[in-house]
Amino acid sequence: MLRRIVLAGCLTVLVAGCASYHPEPVSPIDNASGLDSRTLGDQRLQKFIEVELDRSGKADPPPAWDLSTLTLAAIYYHPDIAIANAKLASAEAGVITARQRPNPALSITNAFGQAVVAGAIPVGAAAMTVGPVVDFLIETFGKRENRTAQAQHLADSARWDLATAGWQVRTRVRTALLNLWAAQQRLVLTHRQLDLQEQLVGLLEQRLAVGEASSVDVMLVRVARAQITFSIRNLEQTEAAARAQLATALGVPVRALDGVDLSLDAFRHPPPIPANPDTGKLRREALTKRTDVQASLQEYDAAQSALQLQIANQYPNVTLSPGYNYDFGVNKYMVGVGADHLPIFNQNQGPIAQALANRQQAAASFTALQAQIIGAIDQAATAYRAATRSVTTGDALLADDERRERQIASQFRAGQVDRVTLVTAELGVAATSVSRFDAVAQQRQAIGALEDALQQPLFDPGHWPVVPEQESGLSHSEPSL
């Protein structure tokens, strides 16, 4: 009876410690419906943004959606963050697996029959042999510690990958916002150009009617008007595409942006950039502290730990096997000691060589990443300097055209020139404004590329959500969907 109670208790403990399976089916229809119903007015999203802004010292949310709040919305909604967070959870679970000690193994041998020598079995003894043996595997030479260190480095790498995913989300949001701002500004300038061109066409048509202009002159201004009109249509299409691009970057349907007040002030007033942005402290920090650099370092450390583990695997583990044997009425107690993987035919040379090659590959990948960062910084800085020079040139040309237009306007008021001359001068200012803005847009794009290369929030630098450095992934940036 006592044995049954002990056996039942052991089984109860084993069952209680086991996990149970709970299915979570995914419905394509329900999932798509949830994605399609996302809005920027979601109360949980608003609470998430409020908490994030409060952590960064911005207790009062801005009245409009700007680069910071839209980035937080993208972190809340975009599936890339959920994927990176799931990978982090998987890597952290790998640490739990690596820390676990091997479970013991139980084996039972049974034999039934009769004794070889008659009368050898004691009176009342069962004619059988029962031998339960428990095998305990004792890992040696720090194998468990090395395995745990490898898993921990991979989890740290996944945590940095989560931060990298956040930066990539910001990049896509900023790029879409910048494209939207550029399209809107070009539309304003081009509409002004079209209004002036309409005036010029009307004036020349009046002259043609009284024989003071040729049909060729009228045809040329009409062709110019048609070209400007087509430019406006293309810009309207570009603006619509930029809105769709922004919605995709946020992880919401494009109609979720309808009626949303978007603040684009971050691009109207560029941040102060040093004269040589490719040198100095920011460059050094990018080469040593970027999230992908930190992830690559952790991958290298994981390769180091993997090599240590394979070197330790040259040496056998110890197996301790206590047991009991009931042998035809005789009680026997045993303690067996064994070893696995005796280094007789090989000393684990193959896995060691593979681990060594993996470490070399990790080191080469880290060097390649730093070289890529240097190239990205140099290219972005060069593009920024060139675009800034173009903006300076555009400012000078626009100032000359505006000064000339003011002179002609003064002459027009004095009756020295006609309206055609005045409108032509105003068209020159409008055309130069469009060309100058192209340089401005290129400068802002170069700042964005520099922001990505340095991994520093140059646009709206006052806020960036910090990815946690310890367990459980994106604790404060992870929405509960």
Image (tube, rainbow, N blue to C red):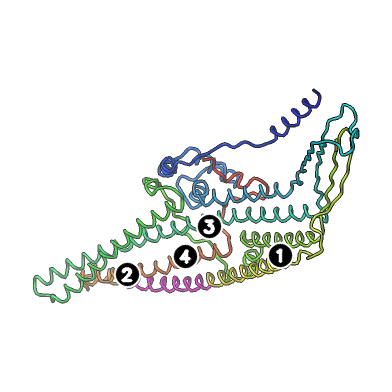
Are the residues tagged 1 and 2 within 8 Å (C-beta)?
no
Are the residues tagged 1 and 4 within 8 Å (C-beta)?
no
Q: Earlier in the sequence, mark 1 or mark 4?
A: 1
Viewer-proximal residue among 425 and 263 = 263
Mark nearer the viewer, 4 or 3: 3
The reply, left or right, for residue 35 in relation to residue 204 is: right
How far apart marks 1 and 4 lie (CA) works out to: 43 Å
Q: Quadrant of the N terminus?
A: top right
Q: Amino acid at mark 4?
A: Gln
Residue 431: mark in rendering:
2
**Residue identified by numbered label 3:** 168
Q: Amino acid at mark 1?
A: Ala
The reply, left or right, for residue 190 in relation to residue 8 is: left
How far apart marks 1 and 2 lie (CA) works out to: 63 Å
Q: Earlier in the sequence, mark 2 or mark 4?
A: 2
Q: Amino acid at mark 2?
A: Ala
Q: Earlier in the sequence, mark 3 or mark 2?
A: 3
Is residue 213 shown above or below 16?
below
Q: Earlier in the sequence, mark 1 or mark 2?
A: 1
**Residue identified by numbered label 4:** 445
Mark 1 burial class by Cα count in 10 Å: few <14, some 14-19, many 20+: many
Mark 4 burial class by Cα count in 10 Å: few <14, some 14-19, many 20+: many
Viewer-proximal residue among 121 and 29 = 121
Q: Residue at x 86, y 29 (%)?
A: 125
Q: Residue at x 81, y 45 (%)?
A: 136
How far apart marks 4 and 3 lie (CA) works out to: 16 Å
How far apart marks 2 and 4 lie (CA) works out to: 22 Å
Tell me where the magenta segment starts and ends, as one range: 382-404
